[in-house]
Image (cartoon, rainbow, N blue to C red):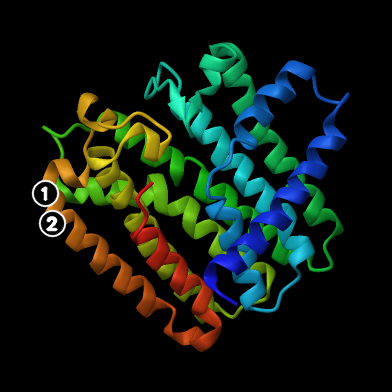
Amino acid sequence: MTFKERQTQYIEAFDQSLAEWREHQIGDIPERLLSAMCYSLFAGGKRVRPVLLLATVDMLEGDLDEAMEFAMALEMIHTYSLIHDDLPAMDDDDLRRGRPTNHKQFDEATAILAGDALLSEAAAIMLRACRKSENKMAAIQAMEEIMEGAGARGMIAGQMEDLMASEKAGNEKLLERIQSLKTACLLTAPLVSGGILAGAPLGSLVSLREYGQCLGVCFQMVDDILDVVGSAEEMGKNPASDAKKDKLTYPAFIGLDETRKRVEQWTNWGVEALQGFGDRGWFLRDMILTLAARTK
């Protein structure tokens, strides 16, 4: 089976589970709120985080049914972060995945509530999974990993430092910290939480965390490159937004050519981190190679 075929399998199974979740919310969540939540949740995207979790559990021969609930929670957290990131008080973007951003499609207050609701629903889904899990401690530890990665010591910390930083005042150490927190934390979380759910030993969890860090930094560097060279049609969002906002990015700080070299370097480090998994790590290896080569 090819990488693309396996990836499609994971995405189709995930989307089916997400659709079933939506059906169960009709009449339970206010119609406008649910519409705003689902507008962004079902807007497409690469489903990178749920795929990473499912692939990790699959690689380690864990329970994919239990993992699916954590995968849904991860995508809800990621989606809420995008809704809030696009708000006028943050990046003030009007295009996301080729469509109007949530606050443009609905209104700013509804977008804020939709993001809040997705974060709360993610926590509720994981708590229900913990309650019915045969290995409750592992499920609780997996939830802790995800919420830490999304919270004040992870993604939100990175967002805060990103808001305070600028190209003029930044340095490479700060830039690496922002990328590590803002992007890598929520890409490391599905890998490590998946390993925890599958009962992986500590050494494997360390390797998964190292790989996730490499994947996250690589992913953000490519995003920054595409913001410079990509088009709205390819990316589904407005390009050159980072430069307009004086954001601290690798292309702005070290140039495009050097950033491309760094992408290759971090990709190689990511592949090396998977060596302990042998042939079982083929999907995660192909994942970082694919994301490093993406054009949108």
In the foreground, 126 or 232: 232
Inspect the image, locate mark 2, and give the three-letter code of the amino acid beneath it. Glu
Q: Which residue is mark 2?
A: 258
Q: Where is residue 139 shown, x and y percent of the image?
A: 72, 61
Residue 4 located left or right of residue 12: left
Rendered-image quadrant of the N terminus: bottom right
Residue 58 located left or right of residue 84: right
What residue do we see at 75% from left, 41% from top?
124
In the foreground, 253 or 136: 253
Q: Where is residue 13 shown, x and y percent of the image?
A: 73, 57
Give the secondary structure at mark 1. Answer: helix
Q: Where is residue 45 shown, x and y percent of the image?
A: 54, 44
Vertical relation: 164 (above or below) 66:
above
Classify 10 Å Cα crowding around label 2: few (below 14), some (14-19), many (20 and above). Answer: few
Q: Where is residue 196 shown, x and y percent of the image?
A: 63, 69
Q: Look at the numbered discs 2 and 1 and tell me whether their residues touch, using CB distance below 8 Å.
A: yes
Inspect the image, locate mark 1, and give the three-letter code of the amino acid beneath it. Ile
Vertical relation: 124 (above or below) 105:
below
What residue do we see at 88% from left, 24% from top?
27
Vertical relation: 174 (above or below) 87:
below
Q: Is residue 195 visible?
A: no
Q: Which mark is residue 254?
A: 1
